[in-house]
Image (cartoon, grey):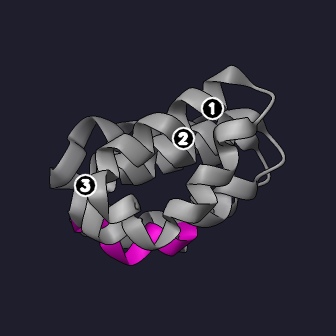
Amino acid sequence: PSVRIASAMALAQMGKAAAPFAAQAARLKLLTDADPQVRGAAAKAIGKMGQAAAPFTADVAKLLKDAHPHVRSSAAKALGQMGNKVAAPFAAQAANLLTHADPHVTIAAATALGNMGEAAA
């Protein structure tokens, strides 16, 4: 998993410039990897691509229900970074995390909803 984590982290470091490579990340199934660290890193990478990663918004949103709190938190942060127009359809799912037992998940969800602004209402 360390190579897959490193791949996702490299994409995250590239930010929006990595958008053309997002499809490759999807083909590698980083968002559905068995390792939660890989899924979390992939969500972070996609989030840093901003609106350019719009085609993967639904895939990131699925991670809001992941069994691992770290992955849920990463997915919420990513949605918040993707922009209000792209992420707004998933605002209700993010709002469901506001009562999560893990405070990191709750904070990430609240931040994401704040980043979505009025579109999340």
C-alpha gap between disc 3 and disc 1: 21 Å
Tell me the tag on residue 80.
none
Q: Is residue 2 left or right of residue 50?
A: right
Query: Which residue sits at x=36%, y=42%?
Result: 114
CB under 8 Å between discs 1 and 2: yes
CB under 8 Å between discs 2 and 3: no
State which tag comes first along the sequence, 3 or 1: 3
Residue 40 at x, y percent in the picture? 60, 41
Q: Residues within 10 Å of mark 1 (few under 14, many from 20)?
A: many
Provide the residue designation for mark 1. 106
Residue 73 at x, y percent in the picture? 60, 37
Q: Secondary structure at mark 3?
A: helix
C-alpha gap between disc 1 and disc 2: 5 Å
Q: Secondary structure at mark 2?
A: helix
Q: Using the rendered image of the protein, determine whether residue 41 is visible from the camera's viewpoint.
A: no
Quick one: 10 or 113, which is closer to the camera? 113
What amino acid is at disc 3?
A: Gly
State which tag comes first along the sequence, 2 or 3: 3
For the N terminus, the quadrant is: top right
Tell me the tag on residue 50.
3
- What residue range appears in magenta? 52-59
Relative to 20, residue 112 above or below: above
Query: Which residue sits at x=59%, y=51%?
Result: 95
Query: Which residue sits at x=28%, y=35%?
Result: 13
